[in-house]
Image (tube, rainbow, N blue to C red):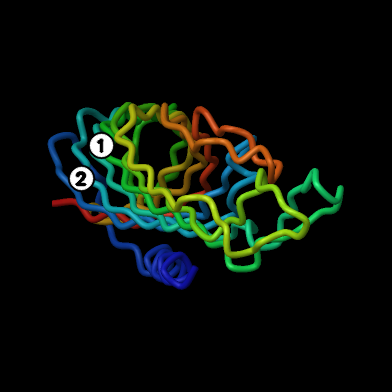
Amino acid sequence: MQFLKAVCFAGSILLVASGAGAIEPGQSGLGLLGSANVPILRFGDWYSISPKVGITYNYVVSSRIMAEVEYHYSNMLGGDLDKREFYWAVDKKYYQSPNASQGMWSHSLSANGVVHLKPLQEEGTAPYLMGGVGFYGFSHEVEGLIFPAQTGETLDASIRLEPYKDKWAALNFVLGGGLSIVTSDRYLVDIRAVYNIALGELRPLEAWGLEKAFPIQTFGLTIGLKYFW
C-alpha cells in the first residue's frame, strides 16, 4: 500500500500548488495509478484485498471525452489453504494441510473510454463514467495439500495432491466511474471506483470449501496522477 500512499501525498501537493490553464483536446498524457484491489464473490473466498499498481496512456478527444490505454499488475494477498480443514472419511475427523501454499499474480491491459458529465475546465472537477475491454493474464499456483481421499488406518501427511500452476489469458471487461480534478494545464488527479470481470477461472478445491471462481471479479478503489503535454 506504500505506492497508494505516495500517490495520495503527491496528489495533495498538486491540488495545493496548481497553476493556471486547462487540459485541452489533442493533448496526450501519462499516468501512475495505485489501487486497493478487492476480490469479490467466490474469488473473495480465495484471496483478500491486495495492492494493484498501474500506468496509463491518455488522449484528450474533446472537452468531455478521454481515450485511455491502461496496464495493471497485482500480486494477490491472503489465502488460507494451510489453515482450512478437510474431512477424512476413514476416521470422520477434520485435518489441516500445514505445508500448503498458494499464490496468484496478474497483469491486465485494457482500452477504456472516459466520458465526463461536464467539460474539463481550468482548475475544476468533473465526474465521469468509464468502460473498457482488454485482456487479463494470470498465474495461479497451489501446492502442499494432503490427499484427502487416501485410505489406511492413519492419515499419511506425506501423501499429497500434485501441485499445479494454472496460467490464463482471459477477456476482461471494465466498468466504473470517478472524478477528474484538473490542477493545471499539465496535471490531473484521477479518483475512480472500478468493477472488473475477467473470463478466467480458478479450479475448485471442494474438499477445502473452495468452489470454482468464474468469472474472476474484483472491485477497485483507485487514485492516480496524470501528466499531459
Query: How would you rate the neighbour count of disc 1 (Cα within 10 Å): few for under 14, some for 14-19, many for 20 or more?
Result: many
Query: How would you rate the neighbour count of disc 2 (Cα within 10 Å): few for under 14, some for 14-19, many for 20 or more?
Result: some
Relative to 6, say whether 160 is above or below. above
- Could you say where residue 42 lies in the image, as x and y percent from the top left? 63, 36
Label 1 element class? strand
Residue under the image location 61 percent in, 56 percent down: 146
Residue under the image location 57 percent in, 48 percent down: 38
Q: Tell me: 155 left or right of 173.
A: right
Q: Where residue 219 is drawn, which disc sits there?
A: none
Relative to 102, say whether 120 is above or below. above
Q: Where residue 68 is drawn, which disc sits there?
A: 1
Are the residues at dot 1 and dot 2 in contact (C-beta closer than 8 Å)? yes
Q: Front-most of 181 and 53? A: 53
Residue under the image location 42 percent in, 58 percent down: 75
Q: Quadrant of residue 180?
A: top left
Residue under the image location 53 percent in, 62 percent down: 101
Question: What's the residue type where badge 2 is placed?
Answer: Tyr
Q: Tell me: 207 left or right of 185.
A: right
How far is the residue under mark 1 from the one under mark 2? 6 Å
Instruction: Looking at this view, name the residue that lies furthest to the right.
Output: 92
Q: Front-most of 173 and 97? A: 97
Question: What's the residue type where badge 1 is placed?
Answer: Glu
Label 2 element class? strand
- Could you say where residue 218 lies in the image, as x and y percent from the top left? 53, 40
Identify residue for label 2.
57
- Could you say where residue 114 lies in the image, as x and y percent from the top left? 34, 31
User: Upstream in the sequence, badge 1 or badge 2?
Assistant: 2
